[in-house]
Amino acid sequence: MVNHPIERSAPVPAGGDRFQEHRKVLRTMTIDYKVSALDTNGGLFVIENTNYHKGGPPRHLHHEQEEWFYVIESDYIVEIGDERYRLGPGDSILAPRRVPHVWAHVGEWKGRMLIAFQPAGEMEVFFRQLAQASNPSREELRGLFSSHGMEVTGSPLPVE
């Protein structure tokens, strides 16, 4: 991590990635970086998550980051603690640090949402490494989460 933010603008076109990469993760989604941790001296990291199938990650928590979700397209279920929310385009919600949460794309078509992590922590490196693991086992996934300041606390949400 650098000790100062990048000193120039970093435009990212629609459908693009901050570093001109598209990361496929968990076989069902792509992650495009919109704001890099390098751009904010580690203060913020923003991704666009595109879901091509129903489902999402395992229930987990972040020890050091808040995670904010903003739905662009389709429908999602988000559980934060014991509360369940159905979100559609334009809806957003914040998952506080150290609170277990899980989300799943439940719409019939492609889904897209912005997800912001504050502070950025190890999230940028996490998604890069997750993309390199084409089909991680449950234990490998737990280890990857753990090595980047998160804890897997349950299974993904079941979706029909």
Image (tube, helix red, strand yellow):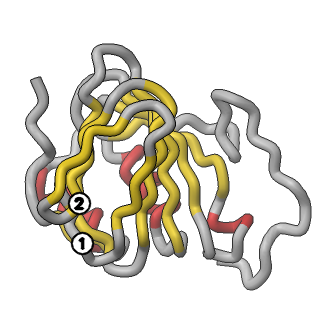
How many numbered discs sit on the rendered protein? 2
Picture layout, residue 145 above or below residue 15: below
Question: Looking at the image, do the residues carrying marks 1 and 2 touch, with CB atoms under 8 Å apart?
Answer: yes
Left or right for 24, reference 133:
right
Q: Residues within 10 Å of mark 2 (few under 14, many from 20)?
A: some
Q: Which residue is mark 1?
A: 99
Q: Quadrant of the N terminus?
A: bottom right
What amino acid is labelled 2 in the image?
A: Ile
Asked where in the image residue 153 lies, by quadrant, the reply is bottom left
For the C terminus, give its image quadrant: top left
* Disc 2 target residue: 80
For this view, does 5 lie left or right of residue 140? right
Residue 54 occupies which quadrant of the picture?
top left
In the foreground, 131 or 111: 111
From the top left corner, tell me how far across and down residue 105 is, in percent. 29, 32
Instruction: Judge the density around disc 1: few (<14), some (14-19), many (≥20) Cα neighbours within 10 Å.
Output: some
Mark 1 → mark 2, Cα distance in angstroms: 7 Å
**Which residue lies at the image location 46% right of the left edge and 26% below the top edge?**
73
The three-letter code of the residue at mark 1 reads Val
